[in-house]
Image (cartoon, grey):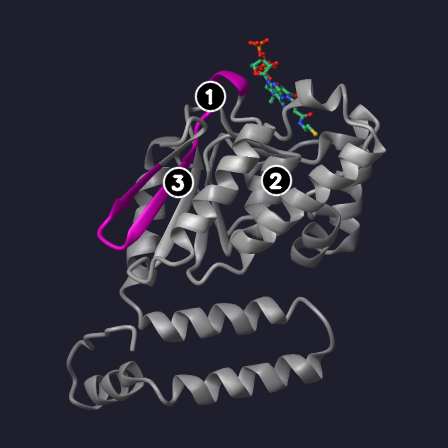
Amino acid sequence: MYKTLMYEKKENIGLLTINRPEKMNAISQELTAELSLFLDEIENDDELRVIVITGAGDKAFVAGADINELVDRDARLGRRVSRERQEIFSRIENLHVPVIAAVNGYALGGGLELALACSIRICSEKAQFGAPEVKLGIIPGDGGTQRLPRLVGQGRAMEMIITGDFIDAQEAYRIGLVNKVFPPEKLKEEAMELAKKIASRPPLAVRYAKEAVNRSQEGDSASGFALESYLHALSCTTEDKKEGVSAFLEKRKGKFKGK
Ligand code: COA
């Protein structure tokens, strides 16, 4: 049982809710430790197909690091906390299944960085996004300076990170930070619909595709192309590939096993 997280699994879709609504779901050390345990728990779940992450309540997805814990954060602690959260968010980014961030309100600081580590972001019309760290005299430490420019371009990312200004849902959509915007009451339903669609696809193909696309954001393209061709080759060895191709040719719906 977690104190700061809620997790439920419906069939093969997991719904993780960051659960400190009285503190705008801010990321405390306790929450960080629980996220790590949660990842230990689900990383070996082979039945799982997709995870949706959202925030409890109707105000915040996650309003950043718990500012109360910043009071005692010196250089040593700053480095440790930053490395720890970077590692956790990288585990989310590289999880064996896609992760959808359903951003239901403020996604600030570490909350923005959590959303950036997810595979796909959708949000409510009420969502706001920002990297307000600079206003506190610090800079992002959970991957934001690297993932935000990759997603929205260096100029947009630079402006958000050095002004600390928030942007609303429509602006986030315009710059490609989120894929879709929904009325608040529809967000969870739409996130589950998207999750169901992904869960209906051949799981190994989804997994290899996620890995190859993630790689496009790092290193040189030659190694990205090489990885793509190996993963493509691997996908050609699966039972699901036989089934997918046969189903198309026989004009029927494929039944996929993740094998
Ligand atoms: N850490 C700790 N507590 C936080 C928090 C955070 N990052 N963000 C919000 N809270 C707390 C507030 O202190 C307040 O607690 P209280 O009721 O005990 O006083 C509660 O959550 C509600 O927040 P409040 O500021 O009253 O709500 P609001 O609607 O006026 O403003 C925000 C919402 C998110 C814009 C504002 O809380 C905010 O700017 N938070 C900090 C964001 C930030 O700088 N994050 C990056 C940290 S590195």
Instruction: Give the left or right position of residue 24, taking residue 9 as reference.
Output: right
**What residue range appears in magenta?**
7-23
Q: Which residue is mark 3?
A: 16
Q: CA distance from mark 3 to mark 2?
A: 16 Å
Quadrant where the image shows the N terminus: top left
User: Which of pointers 2 and 1 indicates the residue nearer the eye?
Assistant: 1
- CB under 8 Å between discs 3 and 2: no
Is residue 5 inside the magenta stretch? no
Identify the residue shown where x is 17% and y is 76%.
253
Q: Amino acid at mark 1?
A: Pro
User: Which of pointers 3 and 2 indicates the residue nearer the eye?
Assistant: 3
Where residue 164 appears, x then y in whole percent?
Answer: 75, 32
Q: Earlier in the sequence, mark 3 or mark 1?
A: 3
Instruction: Give the left or right position of residue 54, taking residue 80 as reference.
Output: left
Q: Amino acid at mark 3?
A: Leu
> Is residue 141 at least partly visible in the picture?
no
Where residue 135 appears, x then y in whole percent?
Answer: 80, 26
Q: Which residue is mark 2?
A: 112
Q: Secondary structure at mark 1?
A: helix
Q: Earlier in the sequence, mark 3 or mark 2?
A: 3
Q: Secondary structure at mark 2?
A: helix
Where residue 112 appears, x then y in whole percent?
Answer: 61, 40
Q: Earlier in the sequence, mark 2 or mark 1?
A: 1
Which one is nearer the viewer's eye here, 96 or 55? 96
Identify the residue shown where x is 36% and y is 56%.
50
Label 3 Cα crowd, 10 Å radius (few <14 / some 14-19 / many 20+): many
Q: CA distance from mark 2 to mark 1?
A: 16 Å
Q: Is residue 9 above or below residue 56?
A: below
